[in-house]
Each structure stands twice: as structure tokens, then as C-alpha cells.
């Protein structure tokens, strides 16, 4: 009883730094009970696709239903590699256009405007796919709209175009030890900063149920207008039922049910008519006196020359995968096992708080070993933390030679053949996860240093995966990635990925622009194109090259044959946003160079580039400020951190509510009552046995 009385309060005090505790207390009344937020959030996505670029206008409407002045804070996802280039705040009939400023300066501008009673908004980047909007001095009973403009490159693989509109995010696991003296001024999430994720509080918005917000909040209207420049055979969505209208080659797409609940990503795919798939495309833009060209080339299908593989499957069984995600992950891994051939070796690694391998060493893909693997995978359940680093180490430092070494013991002749197979065996890792971690940058560095001869392929799972992690992990792993929306959609994406893994790839790719100068060479991205898998396009952007002459692309096919293609730049179609795509590619190159050299990025160069092209970056933010004060300075606005919704299909355990107290007071009372009973028993015993 003494332990209950004294230890529990100490534990309760320590738990305020735990994973499920918020640093700031929002949406909680004076008795510690959950209450609906005072701000109601509406969203409107208008996505226009022209060629390879999708340009989106996202309007957030913040409605203040209380009788107090409010400041709204909303952490939200955008597509990975989105280029945010515009911010507009609309208050009544007034429109205030935002401007890009260095990140620290934008914070100061916003804080001064907020404290002086002026209406102001800012948007800053936390991750390449995660942003924060702050909107200050929303009058009681009024609404303020924040309009955001961003663009992205349309995904294309194996004849299918794809776009993703994220609406929520899976709560991320924050590895590392809590930082006791962390500053929380610009943070208001459920997580506290750690040694590995110092900005944890800024990327951990509260996650609530749909029923916890007003019935008209966290709903979104979505509309796509697709001008692909070619006839389409099919437009579909694995996430929502859609209605389409066609006018010539322009297709308009909307959710059939109208507004959608913001608890899962909206995924849209479209496919050209058979025989109309683009083999190449070139776009041109003239901006600020400079020429920009964007080119895409798709190598033709090569004959199958399948090599033996050493394949390691890694499956995430952490708590965020509970529910529908773990079922999707198990099915994805079972599909992967079906692709193994008798000449392959394999292993299965599951991880949560720690990794565990099915076999001590990789084994041959025999019927018995595959049966054991299928039974093992079918029994996997989700729970625990998301410690990815040990799992990556186990997978990437596994040579895949053990199975061959067993066979090699039979004879020296067999051993020589086995050594030949080992040298030709392709080392591949398939990483199946929702990517819900906060230490992405450290994991990318780990992949780069431990990769060796492996290739890493990622499979995104769930309704709201961290696509930034999936894409970048595959890029640093010299592989490819795909996503699975639900069990009904699992066959198509996985079939394309596994087919690409089996098919030959194009290597040693070289790109030559006409009359290419040293300046043009430095302005062409990517500088070193990565290898291409079957069905993947080569996308290249350049500044300073006029639309004349031919672009030459070449590479090496399996077996050593040379593949080459020329694109006539004079046939380039008119494009928009190419300058922003080029600037984003150059900024990524500067950040990549710093990671490779283990140095601090050139912040001045990134900032200069972002301001020139009006883009948000890790070091620049948008800020908009109205001129006239609307609130008296003696009444500060109440800060509301807007929650996100629990991703569809995930377990209720993924909810992250703010907390004001623990059960310590109750346990203290129980401890006191227990001590009274104990004292009474002692007295009775003394009276009974004097």
C-alpha cells in the first residue's frame, strides 16, 4: 500500500513525458474531459493535371464556433515531393497574399502580427510531406480561409498514372530518449522531443475519432481535372468510389458520395488506351528569361533473363500496423513468397520493438521452407514500438550465402558452381511498413551506409502511410516502391512491383542535351539518373537549354546490350510549373550532397533558391499578414491545436488525446484506504493475541 501511495505519483509525474501525453492541454475542459474543438475545419482540393504536372489548390476554412478569439494550429500531410508555391489568406472581402521568408524571420513576422491583434497566417515545412498551418486572431463566430497552392509530378509506372491526395497521417513512433529541457513554444503535439527526433512535438498532432469532432468538421470536397493529352481507357480509385465526366480528352473526377471524411488518402489512377501508352514526352516553359525543359522516356520491355535472388522480406508488426494494416501486410508478404523460384534463397524478418528472423540464416526456397514461412506469416500480429534501425541492420548485413554454404559442403565441384551462383545472385530486400516513424533522415543515412550490393524495395501499407519514407528509402536503396490501399487493391500494385524486381533493369544511364554546356550540365537533374526497373520512366529536367535539337538517352540492358533513344525537343509541348520542379530538384540535390558528405546543408543556397522560386523549403516559410489590427491587445487569442482523424482501418489504440491528469489521485485515495484497513487489522490482531 505504501508503494501504491508514494510510487504511483512519481510514475504519474514521469509519464507526462511519455508517448501518449501532450505538451499543451487543448480540447479539454476544466474537469479534464474531452470536448469538441472550438474551430471547425473544412477543406477543398482542386487538382488540375496537365501532362506530367499536377497543380493543386487547397483551401482550408477555419470557423470559430466559440465566443473567444482563437488561434488555430493544424499539422497536415501533403504529397511527397510537393512544391508549395502560394499562400493566400481571405478574411471577408479582403485577400492577403503571403510571401516567402527565411524560416526564423517568418516566425517573428507571424508572432508580432498575432500579438498586435492583426490577422495572420503562416505555413512551414516539418518534413517534405508534412506541414503546419498557423492562423491567428480568428474572431468569435467568424471564419477565415487559407488557400495553399502546390504542385507535384504525376506518378507513372507500367502504363498507369497515379496521384495521391493525403488527408490524415498515422501517428509516428519517436525513438530515442526524451529531452528533459526541450522547448515547446512552437510545438503542441502528443509527443515530446527525443534524442533521435528533436522536433517530435511538431510532427505529432492529436489523433481523434471521427465522432470526436463536429459533424461538419474534417470533411473535404475533392475534384480532379485530368488533361493527359491522350485518350484514356480507364479512371479508377482504390480508395473511394468516383464519378467521372468526359469532355474530349479532359476528364473530371469527383467522389461519388460527395464530401469525404478526412481519414484516408484519396488515390486516383488513370490508364491510356491500349497502344496509346506514352513512350516519350517533352515539355517546355519560358520563365523569367530562362528556358526549362522536362523530358520523360520509357524504355521498351526487355526479354526476361531472370537471375537467382537472395530475397529478405521485412514486415512491420508494430502497434501502428494493428487492424487492417497488418492483414494487408501479411497478404503482401504471402504474395511475395509466391514469386520465389527453386534457385532463390530467402528469409523473413518481423520487427516491432526489436527484430526477429524466421531462420537463423537465409534458406533455399524449398517447398518445406516456404510452407514454414507461410505458416509463420499467417500468425503474425501487431504490437509494440517501431524500431526500424535494428531491422534494417539485420536485413542489409545479411549476405544471403548461408544456404549455398550448406550445399557447398557436398563436394568441391558443387562448391565451385555454388560460388558462381552466389556471385550472380541478386541481393534484394522487401520492406513492408506504414513508415510511421519520426527519424526518417537517420534511417536514410543508415540505408546508404549499409546497403552494399543490396537493393531495397518498399511496400506502403494502410490508409495513410508515410510516403516520404517509402519513396526516399527506396531511392537510397537503389530500388522501387509501391503502395497498397486495401486488400481488394493488393494484386495490381504488388504484381507490378514484383514483376519489376524479376525483370531486367536499365543501368549506366546517360543523358545528353544538345549543345550541352558546363552550365547546362550542372542545371540538369537528376545529375546521375538511377537505374530503371521494368515499366519505370526516366524523368529529366534542365534549365538553360532551348527547345531545339535532340535529347539523347542511353543505357545498358542486361547482357551488355546498349539501349538508346532520341527525343526531338522541337516537338515539346507547352508546360507550366517546370521552373518550380527544377528548383525543387536542385534543392534536393543540395540536401543529398550534404547527407552523403555528412555535412550541414548549404542553408544559404537552399534559402536563396526557394525565395527566387517562391517555394517552401526546410529553411523558408510562407507568411501572410493583414495591415489593420482587429483584436485589442489586452485579450490574447486562445490557441487550438487542430486534431487529425484516426486512419481508416487502424485500431482505436492509435488515438492520441490530450491528457490533463493521470489516475494518481484515485490511487492515492486507494492507498490511504488500504493503510487504514491495514492499521485496523494490526490493532485487531494485537487485541486477539495480547
Image (spheres, rainbow, N blue to C red):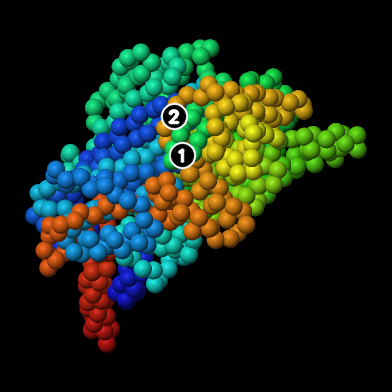
Question: Which mark sits nearer the N-terminus, 1 or 2?
Answer: 1
Q: CA distance from mark 1 to mark 2?
A: 15 Å
Q: Position of residue 92 (x, y in %)?
A: 13, 44
Left or right position of 29 against 358:
left
Q: Residue at x 58, y 22 (%)?
A: 568
Q: Is residue 126 visible?
A: no
Picture layout, residue 116 above or below residue 571: below
Q: Residue at x 35, y 19 (%)?
A: 251
Q: Position of residue 534 (x, y in %)?
A: 61, 26
- Determine the image quadrant of residue 427: top right
Secondary structure of the residue carrying tag 2 is loop
Q: Is residue 147 visible?
A: yes
Give the quadrant of the N terminus. Answer: bottom left
Picture layout, residue 317 above or below residue 345: below
Residue 543's tag is none
Left or right position of 532 against 617:
right
Q: Residue at x 49, y 30 (%)?
A: 284
Question: In front here: 672 or 635?
Answer: 635
Secondary structure of the residue carrying tag 1 is loop
Question: In front here: 617 or 78?
Answer: 617
Give the quadrant of the C terminus. Answer: bottom left
Eye-nearest disc, 1 or 2: 1
Q: What residue is pinned by disc 1?
A: 289
Residue 575's tag is 2
Crowding near the residue tagged with mark 1, few <14, some 14–19, many ≥20 C-alpha atoms within 10 Å: few
Q: Residue furthest bottom?
A: 690
Q: Residue furthest front?
A: 289
Q: Position of residue 129 (x, y in %)?
A: 42, 45
Picture layout, residue 353 above or below residue 661: above
Amino acid at each position: 500500500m505504501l508503494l501504491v501511495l508514494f510510487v504511483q505519483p512519481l510514475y504519474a509525474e514521469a509519464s507526462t513525458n511519455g508517448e501518449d501525453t501532450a505538451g499543451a492541454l487543448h480540447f479539454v475542459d476544466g474537469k479534464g474531459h474531452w470536448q469538441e474543438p472550438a474551430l471547425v475545419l473544412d477543406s477543398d482540393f482542386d487538382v488540375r493535371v496537365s501532362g506530367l504536372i499536377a497543380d493543386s489548390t487547397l483551401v482550408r476554412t477555419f470557423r470559430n464556433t466559440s465566443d473567444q478569439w482563437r488561434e488555430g494550429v493544424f499539422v497536415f500531410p501533403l504529397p511527397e515531393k510537393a512544391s508549395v508555391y502560394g499562400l493566400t489568406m481571405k478574411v471577408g472581402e479582403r485577400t492577403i497574399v503571403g510571401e516567402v521568408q527565411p524560416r526564423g524571420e517568418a516566425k517573428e513576422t507571424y508572432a508580432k502580427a498575432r500579438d498586435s491583434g492583426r490577422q495572420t497566417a503562416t505555413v512551414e515545412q516539418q518534413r517534405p510531406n508534412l506541414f503546419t498551418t498557423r492562423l491567428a486572431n480568428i474572431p468569435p463566430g467568424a471564419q477565415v480561409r487559407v488557400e495553399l497552392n502546390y504542385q507535384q509530378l504525376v506518378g507513372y509506372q507500367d502504363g498507369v498514372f497515379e496521384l495521391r491526395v493525403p488527408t490524415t497521417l498515422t501517428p509516428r513512433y519517436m525513438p530515442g530518449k526524451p529531452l528533459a529541457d526541450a522547448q515547446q513554444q512552437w510545438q503542441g503535439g502528443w509527443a515530446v522531443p527525443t534524442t533521435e527526433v528533436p522536433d517530435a512535438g511538431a510532427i505529432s498532432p492529436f489523433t481523434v475519432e471521427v465522432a470526436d469532432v463536429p459533424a461538419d468538421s474534417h470533411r473535404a470536397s475533392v475534384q480532379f481535372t485530368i488533361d493527359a493529352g491522350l485518350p484514356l481507357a480507364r479512371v479508377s480509385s482504390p480508395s473511394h468510389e468516383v464519378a467521372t465526366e468526359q469532355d474530349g480528352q479532359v476528364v473530371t473526377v469527383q467522389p461519388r458520395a460527395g464530401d469525404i471524411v478526412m481519414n484516408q488518402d484519396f488515390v486516383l489512377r488513370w490508364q491510356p488506351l491500349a497502344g496509346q501508352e506514352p513512350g516519350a514526352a517533352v515539355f517546355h516553359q519560358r520563365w523569367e528569361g530562362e528556358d526549362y525543359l522536362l523530358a520523360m522516356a520509357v524504355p521498351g520491355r526487355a526479354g526476361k533473363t531472370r537471375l537467382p535472388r537472395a530475397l529478405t522480406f521485412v514486415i512491420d508488426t508494430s502497434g501502428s500496423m494493428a487492424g487492417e494494416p497488418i492483414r494487408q501486410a501479411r497478404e503482401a508478404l504471402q504474395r511475395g513468397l509466391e514469386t520465389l523460384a527453386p534457385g532463390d534463397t530467402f528469409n523473413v524478418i518481423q520487427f516491432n520493438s526489436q527484430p526477429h528472423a524466421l531462420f537463423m540464416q537465409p534458406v533455399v526456397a524449398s517447398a518445406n521452407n516456404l510452407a514454414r514461412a507461410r505458416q509463420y506469416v499467417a500468425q503474425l500480429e501487431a504490437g509494440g514500438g517501431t524500431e526500424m534501425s535494428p531491422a534494417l541492420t539485420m536485413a542489409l548485413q545479411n549476405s544471403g550465402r548461408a544456404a549455398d554454404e550448406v550445399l557447398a559442403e557436398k563436394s568441391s565441384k558443387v562448391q565451385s558452381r555454388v560460388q558462381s551462383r552466389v556471385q550472380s545472385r541478386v541481393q534484394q530486400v522487401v520492406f513492408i511498413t506504414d513508415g510511421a516513424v519520426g527519424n526518417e533522415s537517420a534511417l536514410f543515412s543508415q540505408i546508404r551506409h549499409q546497403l552494399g550490393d543490396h537493393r531495397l524495395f518498399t511496400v506502403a501499407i494502410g490508409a495513410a502511410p508515410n510516403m516520404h519514407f517509402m519513396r526516399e528509402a527506396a531511392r537510397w536503396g537503389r530500388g522501387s516502391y509501391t503502395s497498397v490501399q486495401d486488400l481488394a487493391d493488393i494484386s495490381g500494385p504488388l504484381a507490378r512491383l514484383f514483376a519489376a524486381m524479376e525483370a531486367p533493369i536499365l543501368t549506366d544511364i546517360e543523358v545528353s542535351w544538345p549543345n550541352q554546356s558546363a552550365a547546362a550540365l550542372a542545371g540538369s537533374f537528376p545529375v546521375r539518373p538511377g537505374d530503371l526497373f521494368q515499366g519505370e520512366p526516366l524523368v529529366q529536367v534542365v534549365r538553360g537549354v532551348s527547345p531545339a535539337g535532340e535529347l539523347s538517352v542511353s543505357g545498358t540492358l542486361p547482357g551488355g546490350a546498349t539501349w538508346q533513344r532520341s527525343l526531338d525537343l522541337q516537338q515539346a509541348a507547352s508546360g507550366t510549373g517546370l521552373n518550380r520542379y527544377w528548383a525543387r530538384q536542385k534543392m534536393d540535390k543540395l540536401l543529398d550532397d550534404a547527407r552523403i558528405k555528412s555535412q550541414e546543408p548549404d542553408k544559404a543556397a537552399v534559402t536563396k533558391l526557394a525565395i527566387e522560386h517562391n517555394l517552401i523549403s526546410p529553411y523558408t516559410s510562407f507568411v501572410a499578414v493583414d495591415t489593420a489590427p482587429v483584436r485589442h491587445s489586452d485579450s490574447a487569442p486562445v490557441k487550438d491545436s487542430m486534431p487529425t482523424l484516426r486512419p481508416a482501418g487502424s485500431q482505436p489504440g492509435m488515438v492520441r488525446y490530450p491528457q490533463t491528469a493521470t489516475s494518481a489521485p484515485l490511487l492515492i485515495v486507494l492507498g490511504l484506504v488500504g493503510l487504514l484497513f491495514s492499521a485496523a487489522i494490526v490493532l485487531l490482531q494485537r487485541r486477539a493475541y495480547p
